[in-house]
Image (cartoon, grey):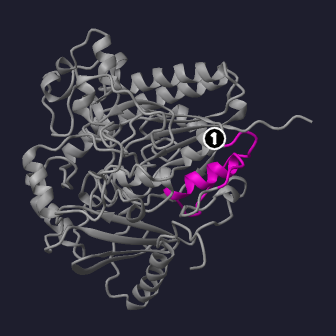
Amino acid sequence: MSQTPQPNILIIMTDQHRPDHTGFGGNKVVQTPHLDALAKKSMRFDQAHVANPICMPNRSSIFTSRMPSLHGTRYNGIALDWRVETFPRIFKNAGYHTAHLGKCHLQNMNVMASVAKRQTDQMAPGDAINFSHYPPGWDDYENLARHKQERVQMPQDYYGFAEVDLVVAHSDQCGGHYYQWLLDQGIDPTTIQGETGAWPYDSPSHMTRRTRTPAELYPTHYITEVASSFLQTRAKQPDTPFLAVVSYPDPHHPFTPPGKYFDMYSPADFSLPDTYRDTHTHSAPHYQKAIKQGPSGLRRGVNMFAPTETELREMGAKEYGMISMIDDSIGTIVGQLESLGLSENTIVVFTSDHGDMFGDHGVMLKGGMHYAGCTRVPLLVHVPGNQPGSTSSLVSSLDLGPTLLAQAGLSAFYGMQGIDATPLLTDSTAKVRDEIFIEEDQLNDILQVGTPLRMRTLITEDARLTVYQGYDGIELFDLQEDPNEMHNRVDDKTLQAQMTERLMRTLMENNDLSPKPTAFA
């Protein structure tokens, strides 16, 4: 009797993508027919949440299945520790060919200017960790400036990935191996990228521009071509299973859909969220400040700001264009699986690293915000032969690694904090978690309380509690009566006591268990 071959695994990721900005997530405007078709044959997780709603921390949590306070990438700007174990490495050591194609962001994209470095040194002087014994250049593989100067050769094991093709940064201003590919096409990237290379366009939003990068040279297209080539190569080596991550940097801001995708949607078609006019009467200071400042608020980087209706609709239309381009690309990749005969033995996952407020509660982007718009992500898992369905059971980004390892018959490593969600793949009524624990740290004092931002959140089926360091206020919502999180139950001492006790116990459960003891001392 022949043994059933180990499954191939294909993980498709987007960046800063809300689940309700897809057709399968209930959106009636954005066109995502290929994702919708994948959803119809997958288990759809409607309550999938992040471990941290920021790029680097949660991407690191996905691959390590550990909270940011444990793996060390607590916020953007800390490269993931070179020593950490990852679930891709377990697959690699088990004989899988592992690959990461596209945006990785486990390391820093930018080398800080001297002024910025002095500022961070002042905020966080010294260090308790000695990195001197790490290999030279270990944290320099995703450096945008380096990729402009050379075709960066990746190590044989990049956090468990044996094959890596990087697209670094966002939108039409990406670098990485993609930058060198543009040069190979005879293109000077500075003539088609970013604000200086964009077509003249009177945009009502500082977050949108009409890119001069044509669709066939846009990062989304490049990643799709690389992924298609990868699948063609793997189809010729059927005896070696693969684990591949195909990661798109869109629809993260700024919103720069190329070609036909730029005018694909009208701003008038974008609906304002039900919570757009939240007054934040009982909210933390940073929300109240953003709403008070309104259109004149801080408008750079990833900072929260309060968009006008006109701005929000413009950003929504352009983000939808980026999403539809990704969807077309996913159609190409899934079609490639089928045409190459790989689909019958390939588990396909679709997810994102975190969400975006996108007008929820009157604000945009992420950072210091633990509303569902930021913490909830799309998650589809298609296992060939399984019945499709949907589940409202709670799952975390931490759970992806243990679940995929179980599907391949591989063991998790000691210290993984994720849970094997395999029961949910065949029984949508099962439950593997009672709560979701979310961390967020920032270098900046976003609340202006005299200390860098630190937040901890607990989400249950019934409620959400968020506490801050240095600020006595809380966010407490009854999700059964108030699923839109509009009424902060600051005076409900009973619910607060119940959720605080659960948060305390969850904090203990998420203490580090690794390394394991080597003896009874």
Q: Which residues are drawn in magenta? A: 383-411
* Secondary structure category for the residue under label 1: helix
Q: Residue at x 21, y 24 (%)?
A: 193
Q: Is residue 310 left or right of residue 106?
A: left
Q: Residue at x 46, y 73 (%)?
A: 511
Q: Residue at x 33, y 54 (%)?
A: 54
What is the x, y in percent for residue 231?
A: 58, 23
Residue 375: image quadrant is bottom left
Task: Give above or below for 312 relative to 463.
Answer: above
- Can residue 407 be found in the magenta stretch? yes
Q: Is residue 134 left or right of residue 3?
A: left
Q: Is residue 174 left or right of residue 239?
A: left
Numbered marks: total: 1
What is the x, y in percent for residue 182?
A: 30, 17
- Residue 358 is at least partly visible in this image: yes
Q: Residue at x 7, y 53 (%)?
A: 296
What is the x, y in percent for residue 362?
A: 24, 58
Quadrant, the C terminus: bottom right
Of 302 and 174, the residue lying toward us: 174
- Can residue 316 be found in the magenta stretch? no
Q: Which residue is mark 1?
A: 40
The crowd level at tag 1 (other Cα within 10 Å; few <14, some 14-19, many 20+) is: some
Residue that protrudes farthest toward the right in the picture? 1
Of 486 and 495, the residue lying toward us: 495
- Residue 45 is at least partly visible in this image: no
Residue 202: image quadrant is top left
What is the x, y in percent for residue 520?
A: 60, 78
Residue that protrudes farthest toward the top in the picture? 186
Quadrant, the N terminus: top right
Name the amino acid type tagged 1.
Answer: Lys
Q: Is residue 4 left or right of residue 429?
A: right
